[in-house]
């Protein structure tokens, strides 16, 4: 199957089947709240297990499903992947060597330029650093990394129809460093990164897209109120805490930079409620819908690119496409 076909095909993994993954996938697909014009392929097997009791076997099944999904997507047999939540501790026991599913997909696709992004309700955040201890964040920050993730975030927002997205860049320290009194990262790294980002995009947009560094204690409220389309965050919990407070049941995790869309619900395995019939499918529904939306955008881009190439040759001026 070519990824440019009009029939979208979305692969869905169940995650650790001792958790709520199988429940929320089934509920989502039966909800009537996902497009029926799309084909959904549930990937992987479910070993015998008790709800709420993960085993090495459930972890192996989750890992195998991830491998199958990424293989199918790289072959062009899937337009996007939606992943259920995994139990990392059990995954590590069976040889999974990645901090999370984000890093797994990046490595399997040979992608170095990737980032973790989350979106839900009126808030979208992307993370400059992700799965590292908090004590390592400050020394892990680099101007080049802020710029790299900022560009990925701008591209993601444009893929969703924001032609000139407004992006706030959060400070690292309280009050964005208070002019250096509470930290120098804003002066030495974040401000220069904001300037570089705007200079890189000035030929594409007439106005500045990036604003910052903005004090972290107000930036998320300003984004929810509509002043910004997204917030570029310096570390994991800086972005995830406000996102989950604002959109706990509709948040979606997106891996930026992959050759295909990959989304997941923004919640864990929920072992404590697995099998009790109380798990809500809202976040899985949102993850599926976003995967469908992003897959459609990729298909449209490929079709338009093909038309542009055809027009180029029709007018007798063949040239290599640069993008």
Image: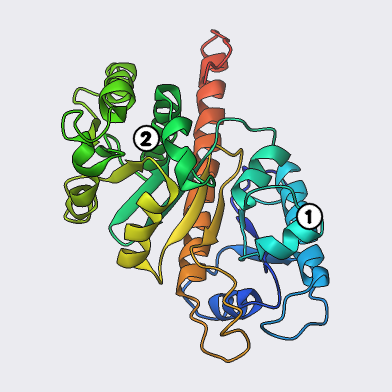
Q: Is residue 151 visible?
A: yes
Residue 185: quadrant of the picture: top left
Mark 2 is surrounded, within 10 Å at the Cα level, by few (under 14), some (14 to 19) or many (20 or more) other residues, namely many
In this image, 290 relative to 54: left or right?
A: left
220 or 310: nearer the eye? 220
56 or 69: nearer the eye? 56
Give the CA separation, mark 1 to mark 2.
30 Å
Q: Which residue is mark 1?
A: 68
Q: Is residue 3 visible?
A: no
| Dot 1: element | helix
Q: Mark 1 or mark 2: which comes first in sequence? A: 1
Mark 1 is surrounded, within 10 Å at the Cα level, by few (under 14), some (14 to 19) or many (20 or more) other residues, namely some
Decide: is 321 above or below 30: above
In percent of width and height, residue 174 lies at 23, 43
Q: Which residue is mark 2?
A: 154
Residue 230: quadrant of the picture: top left
In percent of width and height, residue 170 lies at 28, 40
In percent of width and height, residue 225 lies at 16, 55
């Amino acid at each position: 199957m070519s990824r440019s076909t009009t029939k979208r095909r979305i692969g869905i993994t169940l995650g650790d089947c001792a958790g709520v993954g199988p429940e929320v996938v089934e509920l989502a697909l039966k909800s009537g709240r996902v497009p029926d014009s799309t084909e959904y392929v549930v990937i992987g097997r479910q070993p015998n297990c008790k709800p709420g009791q993960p085993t090495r076997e459930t972890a192996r099944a989750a890992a195998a499903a991830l491998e199958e999904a990424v293989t199918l997507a790289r072959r062009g047999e899937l337009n996007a992947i939606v992943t259920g939540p995994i139990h990392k501790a059990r995954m590590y026991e069976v040889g999974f060597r990645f901090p999370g599913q984000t890093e797994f997909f990046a490595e399997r696709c040979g992608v170095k330029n990737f980032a973790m992004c989350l979106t839900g309700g009126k808030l979208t955040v992307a993370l400059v650093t992700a799965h590292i201890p908090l004590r390592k964040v400050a020394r892990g920050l680099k101007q080049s990394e802020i710029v790299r993730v900022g560009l990925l975030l701008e591209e993601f927002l444009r893929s969703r129809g924001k032609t000139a997205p407004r992006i706030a860049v959060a400070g690292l320290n309280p009050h964005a460093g208070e002019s250096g009194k509470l930290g120098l990262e804003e002066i030495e790294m974040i401000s220069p990164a904001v300037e570089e980002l705007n200079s890189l995009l000035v030929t594409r947009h007439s106005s500045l897209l990036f604003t910052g560094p903005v004090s972290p204690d107000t930036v998320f409220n300003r984004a929810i109120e509509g002043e910004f389309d997204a917030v570029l965050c310096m570390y994991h919990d800086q972005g995830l805490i406000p996102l989950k407070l604002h959109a706990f049941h509709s948040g979606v995790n997106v891996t930026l930079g992959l050759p295909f869309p990959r989304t997941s619900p923004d919640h864990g395995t929920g072992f404590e409620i697995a099998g009790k019939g109380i798990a809500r499918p809202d976040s899985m529904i949102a993850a599926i819908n976003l995967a469908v939306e992003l897959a459609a955008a990729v298909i449209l881009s490929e079709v338009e690119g093909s038309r542009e190439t055809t027009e180029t040759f029709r007018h007798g001026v063949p040239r290599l496409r640069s993008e």
